[in-house]
Image (spheres, rainbow, N blue to C red):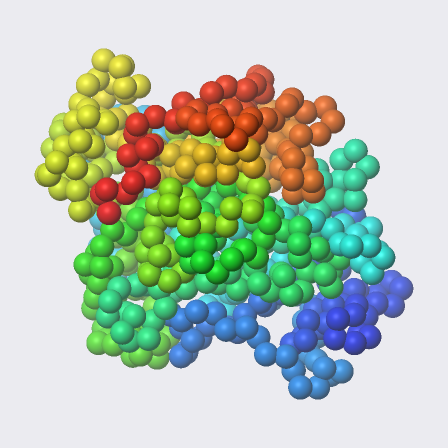
Amino acid sequence: MAVYGAVLSLLIWGINAVVQIPDSPPRVHLGYEIHQGFLNKTGGFYNFSNIPYATPPLGDLRFKAPVPLPDVVDKTNAPINDGSRFAICPQGIPAWTSISTLWLTNGLGAINQSAGYTPPNITSLPPVAYGTSEDCLLLDILVPQTIFENRDRHYGAPVMVWMHGGGYTLGYKTLYGSGAGLVKASQSNGKDGVIYVALNYRLGLFGFLSGPTFSIENGTANAGLLDQRQALEWIQQNIAKFGGDPNRVTLMGESAGGGSTFHQITAYGGLKGKVPFQQAIVQSGAFLPVPSNLEKENIFQSFLLSAGVETLQQARNLSTEALQLVNAQLVGQAPYGSFTFNPVVDGNFAPALPGQLLLQGGYDKSLKVVIGHNINEGIFFTSPFLVNASTFLQNIITVSFPNVGENSIGDYLTQTLYPPVFNGTYNYTDQVLRGALLVTEGLFACNANWLSRAFGQNSHSYLFSVAPSLHGDDIPYTFYQSPNAAVRNGTLAVMMQEYWTNFVETGDPNGPGLPNFPTYYTSPDDSGGGNILNLNISSISVTGDYLANERCDWWQKALYF
């Protein structure tokens, strides 16, 4: 979801050949267009920006799975695209995020805790970010100069694919940076480096509408996840033209991008064989489950009502601006901690929640993974208007887990796993911190434990504990290029980048000058808590997995669903 960081900072010689004359821009023939890049002389890499990877999802293609771009008939006269058309998918930001930023910055005294939260009544479209367009299914590719210029002379370079976070309602491929810092880190110790790819995918109602009526009316649930899948398939088909190896692809994402990576790993319950990547890096993987067909249907009906239409087909005929207003309303007016739109169990691409599929063995087991989380993942998404047991149930349980209610499952959740005991026994001393721990584990941290255990000896697990260790605090370290206020220790940032890029290049994050990063389990017989690499501002050390507990075991069963 990465909202903490996001809100604060948002605002041709043949078909497969590269046609390049010395001192001229590099051009790659993709079949449907010739894409033209440029050499970044400072970074020493070729930049191919804003490459379309699917047909624009407009008109009748709205709310459907992405469609590949057809090749042009006359390939010798294919259109040339210089990559200058920057676009981001339509965005949506919950209004409560401004309150979270306020109180986390200035303390609880900055708000009236007893007043509660009332979502605003949004009647007009907020300012639209530059480049916003439904024609946004684009990706960027950064290729180290040596790799690109020798693309026909070796087997291909490893590829790192970045998927941004943002609660499935906001964000875009270059929100946190171009990826140049990661490319530079990949070239440490004289290595050739990696190819970096970043992609957009549909967000909010454009990518995550669902429900029984929606499906009956020819809508495709989880269209945003299918966009990601299409981009990954595009990479399999085209990355060799840029010097990359389609058999050495690492998918990497944070927050919603990390949660999306979970969904890609468990796609189709593992029944369609290997996924179109070989490794994954999951940072703070997050998703808020939409728990029932009734909830999905209610969201869809609210969409139709707000849009002033009766059918999905009528909605396909609306203007982008009209849909943007509806999206702004449904996302902006979301209950505290919610984003309205999230991936759903659809019976196809997502036959069950990712945690359940990992528990049942419904995933691609051939992968290697790096998984991590931050200490205080959930506090940004936790309502501060928690003053008693009643407001705790109203603002935490009802919002995120409406199926629980006042039954035995709800009682077990609130009285046994997260009981109202504020003497420090459960690592919280008030209702807000109690709610934050529940949200941290239920929506973020336990996901890391599940993935670590599922892959065992083929996983490396870490904890980012640089204070305050909020959700998204690790992203400036991931995209580090030069000293900045968001990075308290530049040396740690560079080491993290080297761990990540070593893993992309070799399947092992370890390398010269780095503290040992062990696998989660050291033998096939291991179980329970494994090894965690603690990334702290003053040291890097190995500890046990404190998430190997009954609470994470309970969450994985999804008894609340």
Which residue is at the front of the view, 111 or 553?
A: 553
Q: Is residue 329 above or below residue 160?
A: below
Q: Which x, y percent locates residue 55?
A: 53, 74
Q: 194 left or right of 345?
A: right
Left or right placement of residue 285 versus residue 17 in this view: left
Instruction: Name the image quarter holding the N terminus.
Output: top left
Measured along the vertical axis of the image, is residue 537 above or below residue 288?
Answer: above
Q: Is residue 120 left or right of residue 536?
A: left
Closest to the observer: 122 or 454? Answer: 454
Q: Residue furthest bottom?
A: 73
Q: Nearer the viewer, residue 123 or 65?
A: 65
Image location (x, y in percent) of residue 477: 58, 34
The answer to whether residue 139 is visible is: yes
Question: Looking at the image, which residue is at 54% across and 55% down?
Answer: 274
- Residue located at (28% from left, 69% from top): 214
| Above or below, 512 relative to 300 | above
The residue drawn where x is 89% and y is 64% is: 22
